Amino acid sequence: MQYNILFLVILVSSPIFNFSSKTTDMKPNIYFRFSCAAIVLLFAACSQSTSFTNILLKPWEGPYQGTPAFDKMKVTDVKPAMLKAMELSLEEMEAIASNPEAPTFENTIEEMERSGAPLDRAFAYYGIFSSNMSSPEFREVQTELAPLFSEFQSKITQNESLFQRVKTLYEASKENPLPNDQQRVVELTYQSFAMSGADLDAEKKKRYAEINKELSTLYTQFSNNVLHDEENYITYLSENQLDGLPDDFVKSAARIAESKGKTGKYAVTNTRSSMDPFLTYSTERELRNQVWTNYYSRGDNDDEYDNKAIIAQILKLRKERVALLGYANFAEWRLQNRMAKNPENALALMEAVWPAAIARVDEEVADMKAIANSMGDTITIEPWDYRYYAEKVRKAKYDLDSDEVKQYLQMDKLTDAMHYVAGRLFGYAFSPVPEGSVPVFHEDVKVWEVTNKDTGEHIGLWYLDPYAREGKRSGAWATTYRSYSTFDGKTNVLASNNSNFVKPAPGEALLISWDDATTFFHEFGHALHFFASNVKYPTLNSGVRDYTEFQSQLLERWLSTDEVIDRFLVHQKTGEPIPDVLVAKIKKAATFNQGFATTEYLASALMDMKLHLADPTYIDVGAFERKTLAALNMPKELPMRHRTPHFGHVFSGEGYATAYYGYMWADVLTADASEAFREAPGGFYDKEMAAKLVTYLFAPRNSIDPAKAYRMFRGRDASIDALMHTRDFPIPNN
């Protein structure tokens, strides 16, 4: 997770790396990572000469170039570590700024690249406490530190001497370009300063810093409110309320209830991994309503943990801040260096797909009504009914039982499948490290060493934290504790994937849905993007939000390849391979429920954009949500994937603010790139295509413009046609 003092960071709240609950995005503003929901992609190899007693600041020791001492971290160490680390980092920045020599790439940019090692290390632990191991004690510390982080950031971005050195180098580079990687670093660094108000006058700089400080507190409050509602709204079932639920779900629910002192009961937790299967299979309609309401009302219960007023204030402050820079709205500011370039282009893509999506929902609802009528259920389809009757339609239309499919989707086997794909495409081998040789922050976390399978060269470590637990944020995400660079010596990668699967009962296999398996592959795609990095300078490990989701979404496609299906989809009890007839049903049903999936996602993406284009002066967040959905003709039978009061992607930080559209933007690239593999002689495992995949799409990170990188891979730009074909939607007329 290391990053230099000026960095581009991904703030996620998914998956995550998921959006769906899939994770990861990059923004060109200098925002420090306040939680592990951020995928930090920059780091520095800094001086290790200072001696520290605080474990969170100490250089990492042990094999594999050193690893975080997760087994020794304590919440009480967090605040003093952060305060000291920020102090040291500011001293480093001031030394660069006050250098009497004329600015050069070496004495300015390179020194900034290698700054901040103690802070890097401290944030590795901070991220774990924030996302994986939160507690009331930590949340108090988090609340105290949030405004201090903001002040720290402002002291750097508003350091006039430092900015002038960067500006001098940037302007000189326009006349006399530097080598490509150095030029890119200079441009990104200058852009980070400029977008953070470095060119403002003293009065505006002061207000800019004040706004950032206010926002940092609001982001923390928003996140903690959502986490409160996830932890405190649990539905307990009795023995007579289990009808329709799969055995593995029942066993897990019993275990969770027992752990909470409710022996003999069955717990449905307020997380997607628990909510989704319950709504899919439970015959208890009133209970489905209750579970659905608990989940989609997070942050919207009109109590002290309600987020609507917080969101309104966030929107006002964001607009005020970018107005200081001369931008009409937050979206205009944010998208200027994304692939979309402006909100109009992002909206154009979403609005091109939206009509086909909601039309498909109408078809799906008609199918569900027919099924319900045939069952004697004379009801109107409500949001808590959608998954239940959709599953009935799936069985009737495709003779496909999701629970039957789950019997062949074991998490351990899918982990092996991902490693297999990484071996075929990237030449990586994954070997479990000896237990106890690498510190972990929870007993559920497992670690693998990643090597080049041909040469044996060490590449890094892969951490996996798969299970839901109290204090762990929902969704799925990917992150790094250390990223690759060759600056000041080659560094390995410490990357992690994090999920929220419901832990199975002892001795039982963890069975997951096809959608969850897809997300699992998605997040692993982010990890491979980290491992494949081949950049010199830490800053070049940053990314562009509507592009960095592309690599992870692309990897999803390998789940359904014959090689993975034939080798790794085996029955949890018999070990028999998944029958060909069932595979045929899965592939035939590949576009099933695309109306639901596309509409729930797009509604959230459109809401995100429209909130930031609206005048926030007197905004009523709840009323705006209702009015916007009505104007979109949002089907009443389903909600947004992330309702505004718990939309952590957008309001627990800024990584996905006006950027949630990026998943669809990336999916256009994904669908187009997938066609390239399908057309290749070796299909999805074609050696030549795999080499191009690594060389042009994964290894460069942000060292070249994403649009150029994609053209180098494909020979042309991507079009929307492949996306529409993949979802079985009609291709819109141009």
Image (spheres, helix red, strand yellow):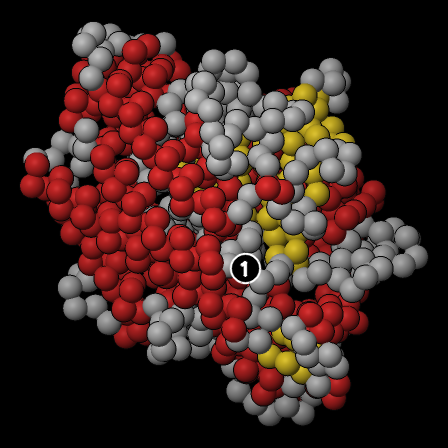
> Which residue is rendered at x = 47% and y = 29% of the image?
52
The relative height of residue 117 versus residue 462 in the rendered view (above or below) is above
Q: Is residue 557 left or right of residue 697?
A: right
Kind of residue indicated by mark 1 = Gly
Q: Answer whether residue 419 is visible to the viewer in this image.
A: no
Q: Is residue 524 above or below residue 569?
A: above
524 left or right, relative to 454: left
In the image, 149 versus 400, the foreground residue is 149
Q: Which residue is mark 1?
A: 471
- Residue situated in front as seen by the camera: 161 or 296: 161
| Most foreground residue, 166 or 401 | 166
User: How many numbered discs, if any?
Assistant: 1
Identified at 41% across, 33% down, the residue is: 119
Report which quarter residue 98 is drawn in: top left
Q: Residue at x 58, y 62 (%)?
A: 470
Q: Kindly identify the residue that appears in the image at 37 percent across and 65 percent down.
A: 644
Name the foreground residue: 128 vs 388: 128
Left or right: residue 417 compared with residue 602: right
Indicate whether 695 appears above or below 376.
Answer: above
Q: Is residue 172 visible?
A: yes
Q: What kind of element bears circle 1?
A: loop
- On the rendered structure, is 583 left or right of 15? right
Percent across and percent down for residue 690 are: 64, 26
Q: Residues within 10 Å of mark 1 (few under 14, many from 20)?
A: some
**Where residue 167 sits: x, y (%)?**
19, 20
Quadrant of the image occupied by residue 409? bottom right
Residue 9 image point, x, y percent: 40, 38
Residue 694 vertical placement versus 320 (above, below): above
The quarter of the picture where residue 47 lies is: top left
Q: Position of residue 687 (x, y in %)?
A: 69, 23
